[in-house]
Image (cartoon, rainbow, N blue to C red):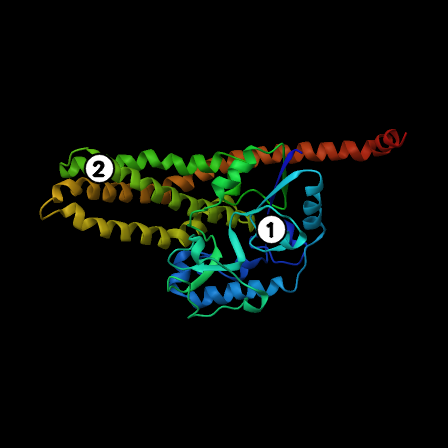
Amino acid sequence: MKNLVVLTGAGMSAESGISTFRDAGGLWDQYPVEQVATPEGYAANPKLVIDFYNERRKQLLAVKPNRGHKLVSEMEKFFNVTVITQNIDNLHERAGSSHIIHLHGELTKVTSSWQPNNPAYIKELKPEEYEIHLGDLAGDGSQFRPFIVWFGESVPMIETAIEYAETADIFLIIGTSLNVYPAAQFESLTYPFIIMFSIPFAFSGVLMALYGTGTTLNVMSLLGGIMLIGIVVKNGIVLIDYITLCRERGMSVIHSVVVSGRSRLRPVLMTTLTTILGMVPMAIGGGEGSEMWQPLGVSVIGGLTVSTVLTLILVPVLYCSFAGTGIKRNRKKMKASRELNDYYQAHKTEMTKGKKE
């Protein structure tokens, strides 16, 4: 049998009555994303986050899989079906699909706050256990947190999803705008390009810091540069994804960039400052063996300082530039779609008549 990969998003579950996150009137309009869907929000107010996802679980008890979920399940009679879903609900499972990859986690599971991706501490909740409380602990002694991939966190299942996508004979997309990272990379290289474009400039900060302090370029300083890549990419993803969220709420490109920059400024600066402060003792040196570690500290501090400024300035500028091109391209697609629909409506009788005969 042929391999069928089905990528589903919030629109799939919306028909069952589950609130979407991004649409007007969705959950992000009711709850600020930075409060309930970021590690920073969880650290600041864990009770608010736990209660938010408790309510989402209770909602699952009142909804059922819709016809779309069931049709995807029935396709297993004819294809080797893999469902890659951005949704955190369990409606695909309840509809009977047997192979499901959850990109953004699963609502019916909780995990360790310290080691969220460690299988040993992931727990599947029974319906009568859907409400967790502060003080409910995982096996490592940490507070149970939702098994959800929040903004700014890595997506552990993305590599697995890509492997299955690459083997697909048929790739079906249902209920997603493909504007949410990481699913967006199935459609376009624009956003990854914008994010990766800032990495070379971050290395310029490394070189300036090394030159200014008279530190040599060696293995340790290069190691510091490699460490920068993860932080630079993460900051870029957080910013781009929030801009996309604002765009889907109906904001203009410029307004989306301004709102996103203002909203994500604190998380980006917190990540940068904590890392820089941690590297200061290493960069200052002092003590036996400090000369070996000093280039690492200097390169990280210099690179982070420059990359943070670039993330907050260069990334939005590039987004605005590419968004203008994207809008023009989408208008052409919409025009072509309208023309095709008009042609079909004008010749519908002839086309359907030919099929019947």
Decide: is 50 above or below 334. Answer: below
Q: Position of residue 112 (x, y in %)?
A: 41, 59
Q: Residues within 10 Å of mark 1 (few under 14, many from 20)?
A: many
Disc 1 is placed on an element classified as helix
Query: In which quadrant will I find the C terminus?
Result: top right
Q: Is residue 150 above or below residue 82?
A: below
Frontmost residue, 237 versus 173: 173
* Image x and y of residue 171, in percent: 62, 36
What residue is rendered at 54% in x and 58% in y? 107
For numbered disc 2, what is the local secondary structure?
Answer: helix
The image's mark for residue 10 is 1
- The residue closer to the viewer here, 253 or 272, is 272
| Dot label at residue 354 | none
Count of number-bearing discs? 2
| Residue 24 locus on image (x, y percent) | 59, 55
Image quadrant in which the N terminus is located: top right
Question: Relative to 26, is 82 above or below?
Answer: above
| Sequence-earlier tag: 2 or 1 | 1
Residue at (68, 59) in percent of width and height: 64
Question: Within 10 Å of the Cα at label 2, are there few (<14), some (14-19), or many (20+) other Cα atoms?
Answer: many
Structural distance between the alpha carbons of marks 2 and 1: 44 Å
Relative depth, front residue between 345 and 106: 106
**Kind of residue sitting beneath label 2:** Ser
Instruction: State the residue in front, 326 or 302.
Output: 302
At 68% from the left edge and 45% from the top edge, which residue is drawn? 72
Q: What is the three-letter code of the residue carrying label 1?
A: Ala
Residue 164 placed where, x, y %? 55, 37
Q: Is residue 352 left or right of residue 261?
A: right
Give left or right: position of 30 versus 79.
left
Q: Is residue 114 left or right of residue 59?
A: left
Residue identifier under label 2: 221
